[in-house]
Amino acid sequence: MGRKKIAEAREPFSTMLKPRAIEDIKRLAEKMHITPSLMASNLIDMGLDDAELLDKLGLIRVTLIANDVANKIKNKAIKGEKINIADIAL
């Protein structure tokens, strides 16, 4: 399962990572005898495959809705307001 594998040119993409993530990428790349750049690229591809599956299953939307409900409850609790289910309607 996953995205179709298409031979295509790669292009640079910069991102900020935590030092620990960089260490882990380098460590795993060394074990697999590939460059850290290829390791990071492979991990991104794997993550995108997983995200696409979650999206197709509708789980990304469910997560967004759950997060919205949790934020509404938290905001009411912080303000000391009574929490009614009707107030948290989607």
Image (spheres, grey):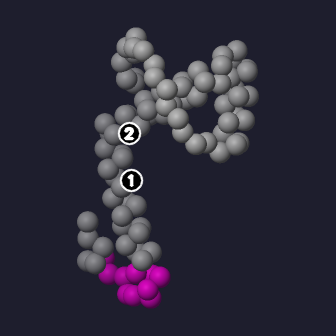
Q: Which residue is mark 2?
A: 54
The amino acid type of the residue labelled 1 equals Thr
| Residue 46 appearing in the image | no
Quadrant showing the N terminus: top left
Q: Which residue lies under the disc numbered 1?
A: 63
Question: Which region of the structure is painted magenta?
Answer: 76-85
Whether residue 84 is visible: yes
Is 19 above or below relative to 82? Answer: above
Q: Amino acid at mark 2?
A: Leu
Residue 26 or 72: which is nearer the viewer? Answer: 26
Q: At numbered mark 1, what does the secondary structure look like: helix, strand or loop?
A: helix
Figure check: 74 above or below 81: above
Residue 29 rendering spot, x and y as whole percentages: 68, 23
Side (left or right) of 3 relative to 32: left
Q: Can you say which quadrant of the picture contains the C terminus? A: bottom left
Q: Residue at x 42, y 77 (%)?
A: 75
Q: Residue 74 shows which numbered tag? A: none
Residue 34 position within the rendered picture, expressed as x and y whole percent measured from the top left: 66, 16
